[in-house]
Amino acid sequence: MKSIRAALLMSLALGACAANGPPPATASAPAEKPAVIAVPKDPWPSQYKAWPSVTTVIRGGTIYDGAGRKYAPGMVRLENGKVAEIGETVAIPAGATVIDATGKYVTAGIIDIHSHLGDYPSPGVSALSDGNEATSPARPEVWAEHSVWPQDAGFSRALAGGITALHVLPGSANLFGGRGTTLKPVYGRSVQEMKFPGAPYSLKMACGENPKRVYGGRNQMPQTRMGNIAYARQTWSDAAAYKRRWDDYTRRAEAGTAKPTDAPRRELANDTLMGVLAGEILVQNHCYRADEMANVISMSKEFGYKVTTFHHAVESYKIADMLAKEGICSAMWADWYGFKMESFDGIRENIALVDKAGACAIVHSDDANGIQRLNQEAAKAMAAGRRMGLTITPEYAWTWLSRNPARGLGIADRTGTLEAGKAADVVLWNAEPFSVYARATHVWIDGALMFDWGDPKRRPIADFELGQPGEREPK
Amino acid sequence: MKRALLIAALASAAFPAMAATIAITGGTVLTANGEESIAGGTVIIRDGRIVAVGAGVPVPAGATVIDATGKFVTPGIIAGMSDIGITEVEGVRETNDAGARTSPFSAALDLAPAINPHSLHIPINRMGGVTRAVVGPQASTSIFGGQGAIITLAQGAATVIRTRAFQYVEMGESGGRNAGGSRPAAWAQLANSLAEAQRLAANPAGYDRGQDSGSLTKRLDAEALLPVIRGAQPLVVHAERASDIRQVLALKARMPALRPILIGAREAWLVAAEIARAGVPVITHSLYDLPDDFETLASSRSNLGHLQAAGVVVAIGALGGIGGTYSVNLPSYAGNAVGQAAVPGGKGLTRGQALASITANPARIFGLTDAGTLAVGKAGDVVVWDGDPLELMSAPVAVLINGVPQPMESRQTQLRDRYKALGRSDLPLQYPQ
């Protein structure tokens, strides 16, 4: 399992490019006042541009809109990259492409909140193993996007599985793994051409076995769970001090009493942590056990930050009420359990029980294969919940795949549900998508048809796969 | 005739191994014999064995009846390769007996004595309809992993039903790594080990005399390979790349007594006809579709379909390379192979072939002549499902092994029941209710 293997892999080389000066200040202040230096919020902005689309109406199919509603049958119109209209009937403009989905299913695109595509790409050779900067327990300065190899064949497989956005995270060797980035499974020549515009960054954190094993094995701190927490608390305390320095400088600079040279020296690691403390960067926290999640919640309260989502969270069912009260999402597998000590208490009803308690439930993959069939994982989770007597409809369960992960990533205002004005991130399935026999036939991202199972020209082939055996074989 | 509710039938699990006569009536019976599906069929089990299967079969007087109306009835699932009973927590070394990282022995390693009948994974898999499992080793210090076993998942029965069921060998990238760093090193080790076994067979008394003190093959390891070279024990060979698979077929051509079983075999579809001609069966996964390694560049979910079409006997195993792969999910892996048939240009399995790939075929591959199909004379390993058994939403409602209804609870259901209602009461949850 990648979650184990990833932690065991050692990064071979330290980052070679460490010396980046601070970017130029934004010099928009009046002439009489010195410029106010600020830490840039988005110094590497997305260069993604939606691919060309045509106005498309999908009619006749059953729709799960990702917000818990079902239209059976329903119609949806995609226009200018957005959902223009959805309902039992919608207007069909002249010249629109009309797709008959009778007997088929239409859903909001699936969003995977936990992926390592690009960072641990195929083939899984050490030369391409770029997911863990396991050189210090705290590496909030590294960004997963800078490890992403855009030619990972996994992106095409994820797309074929109905994925329209995915969050690529650093691994869990470190307590502070670095920044995660939301991408679209749309090939680009650079990662910036894949990056979801305007999506907030995340900070990957990890508790439990991985950090203490990786560093304890080297006789370094942390070697224990108490070491994990102590190290993290000191790191947060230092970050709070960094934030105070910037806040103080900013106050003085805005009052005209500080020069640009008074600005604190930028520390990239603390930039990320300060972003968390300011509520701009979302914490995605790898954590299996209930008691450890509770510890992390206490730590977040001590330092005044919020955990957005606990990932892997196999014991969320034990504290589902607490997670509901705190407003923290859980990103979970349907049935992974028992492969390591901290996953020993995993149960198949976890996702349904978290949802039942009123907490935010998300189905995630953490796996290059699992990301291709998150609908199947949700089906298993729904079935387990139903067998214990819970009422869960398929259209409701779809919220675990689209709306809730969009919330967990801070992009729910743009995608995650099929509602007028949101991105036209849509999947057409040949059968009820919780059936084992169902496959995605068409995937639209921002209204552009990026995958069509019947059209070899709409099935991307990564550079790496060119010339390889089976290059054009449908996977 | 006693009419009993399903629940009542299950309650009899408190007295395992009682050879009651059981009649499973009214269900859609999928026998795993071709596409056979018997609507409203009856399966009669007496003294642990199936004595009748069909429509209109009379229910014997005194039989305990399991009403399967609206349900599906299949043979028990046979996990084609697993670590059930040999590994409790994969990442906790003390509980993982699948591989021996620093043992001086390799082929001689025998899993059977290490299998734990009280493993928590046995009830978890059994609840999912798995009634037998092939348990395999991991090779660590050599190309050879040692000898696997076959177990029954029956509660309270002798778990190991066949010791030394096969020898396991790595012949791809892992084999090269274990043998010293290359594929030629792996093939040299294999050639040397088989030759040593032949030398031992020719002159057992003289084996230790005159042997180079630097011999790479210990006597115990050579002895373990005797049934392999004689064809008495199958040789499970992990190979992924088409060219590695071809080398395995060439080895069989040179040593016709060998009985290789290919496992992994992601690129097998490229050489499907050759595999079929050699009569070599394949155990693979239905969901391999990534170029995970340089030996798996041609991975495709159509692998199974192409192999089946070529006439290869195929089984699905919950093999590595797929995150969270568990034997309990074998039916849905088989269902995915059916779904692949709908993909334009894809190649899949029919529903009958898919069911066979997790029942009849693993039985055939490992010579479990008393299991794998619903037929007269077979063991009473039968599962009643609440829906299409290959569907994700379906689950067993009754599992019988040797005609004995099995308990439908596990540590996981105990955890679920403990935590299903959160909130404070008089005592912590850890006090038994």
Image (cartoon, coloured by chain):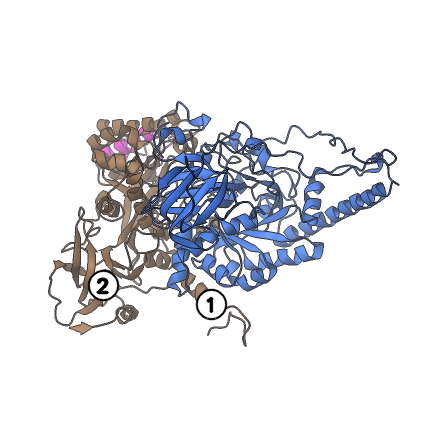
Chain colours: A blue, B brown
Pointer 1 chain: B
Q: Mark 2 lies on which chain?
A: B
Question: Position of B128 compared to A144: left or right?
Answer: left
Q: Quadrant of residue A459?
A: top left
Residue nearest the viewer, comparing B281 with A67: A67
- From the viewer's perspective, tell me whether residue B299 is left or right of residue A46: left
Label 2 or label 1, whichever comes before in sequence order: 2
Asked whether the viewer can see residue A80, the reply is yes
Q: What element carries label 2?
A: loop
Horizontally, residue A111 falls left or right of residue A457, namely right
Residue B260: tell me if it is visible: no
* Residue at the limit of the structure toward the bottom, as seen here: B426
The structure residue drawn at horizontal position 42% and vertical position 64%, both measured from the top left corner, is A390
Q: Which picture quadrant has residue A474?
A: top left
Instruction: Estimate the x, y position of residue A305 in percent, counting from the top left.
Output: 67, 53
Q: Which residue is the site of mark 2?
A: B68
Specify the amino acid type for callout 1.
Arg
Could you tell me residue B120's position as x and y percent? Answer: 40, 58
**Magenta range:** B190-218
Query: Which residue does the image show at 39% across and 66% down from the upper left?
Result: A389
User: Where is mark 1, residue-wise?
Assistant: B418
Is B399 contained in the magenta span? no
Q: What residue type is labelled 2?
A: Ala
- Choose mark 2 or mark 1, whichever is in front: 2
Numbered circle sitting on residue A201? none
- Marks 2 and 1 on same chain: yes
Quadrant of the snapshot with the C terminus of chain A: top left
